[in-house]
Amino acid sequence: MASSSFSLEGRRVFVSGHRGMVGSALVRRLEREKCEILIADRSIDLRVQASVEEWFAANRPEAVFVAAAKVGGIGANQSQPGQFLYDNLAIATNSIEAARKFEVSKLLFLGSSCIYPRDATQPIVEESLLTGPLEPTNEWYAIAKIAGVKLCQAYRREYGCDFISVMPTNLYGPGDTYDLAKSHVVPALIMKALAAKAQDAERMEVWGSGEALREFMHVDDLADACVFLMNSYSSAEPINVGSGEEVTIAALAAMIADIVGYAGPLLFDHSMPNGPARKHLNSEAIQRLGWRSKISLERGLRTTVQNLNKNDIL
């Protein structure tokens, strides 16, 4: 693990995917830095190399956060494997190559905890990458993210680029996707709890057995960690960012139901996939550098529900 000193002050900083959950959180966090925030408008298709390179040539960013991605839950990953693999491969390779070509001083590529093997020893250390089979329910997305990590490593070795990769745990918060066909577990459970309350339902359905263990982190925590790592981390090895707080899906569903105000029972649908039995990141590396998660799960979920608006859930 290598520390470094890289200031964003006075620099032109590009956040790709600024309309997404992670990208918008990064923009909020960077507003506290003395930098110029750059965003690309809807006319720029990050899957098209010429479009990306034209934007880089015109705007000349000095630092880049690659937060753009096609994301979704288990259902979306299983029904759209080609889209998840192609879109995320194209976004990663085009962004990283343009940053190299136009001599960006530093780049941070956002990966995912799903890059690690399905049966990795828990908590998962960074060295687990490529030591076993992936979780089948999200392997297409994972393969694209692994390719991005490896491209950053290859460009460090071949060209001396200061490109780093960050592996966040499961995220939630403002800007999440609340479409049940595409959403991850937290927004899906929030929507189900809101619907159950509104309909005075006899029960609230939850996918799987509820026994799976997961670690969740508020997206504003991740954004803070990313700025910290951009300032202080420089290594070919990816670095994990987690909250350290684990919970079963059953306990998560009960917590969300309580926050929303739904008092009925939970019905676990054992015919639906659980995903891996446990997924918990070892975040000791970033902790040794001096960063720790600050937003507890209960507080983060409560503020997320309280701040929902019609645009989030339409």
Image: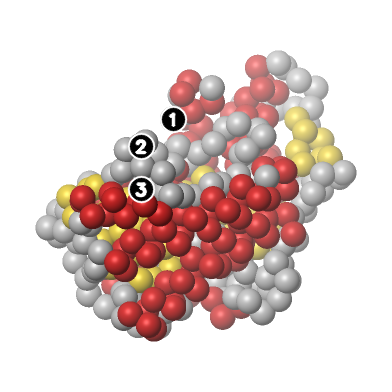
Q: Position of residue 166 (x, y in %)?
A: 44, 65
- Residue 307's disc number: 1
Q: Residue at x 45, y 37 (%)?
A: 175
Q: Nearer the viewer, residue 289 or 183?
A: 183
Q: Residues within 10 Å of mark 3 (few under 14, many from 20)?
A: some
Q: Label 2 sits on what residue type?
A: Ser
Residue bearing mark 2: 43
Colour setting: secondary structure
Left or right: 236 in relation to 85? left
- Callouts 1 and 2 close, C-beta under 8 Å: no
In the displayed orientation, state which residue is furthest to the right: 271
Q: Label 3 sits on what residue type?
A: Ser
Could you say which quadrant of the image residue 187 lies in? top right
Q: CA distance from mark 1 to mark 3?
A: 35 Å
In the displayed orientation, state which residue is furthest to the front: 50
Residue bearing mark 3: 51
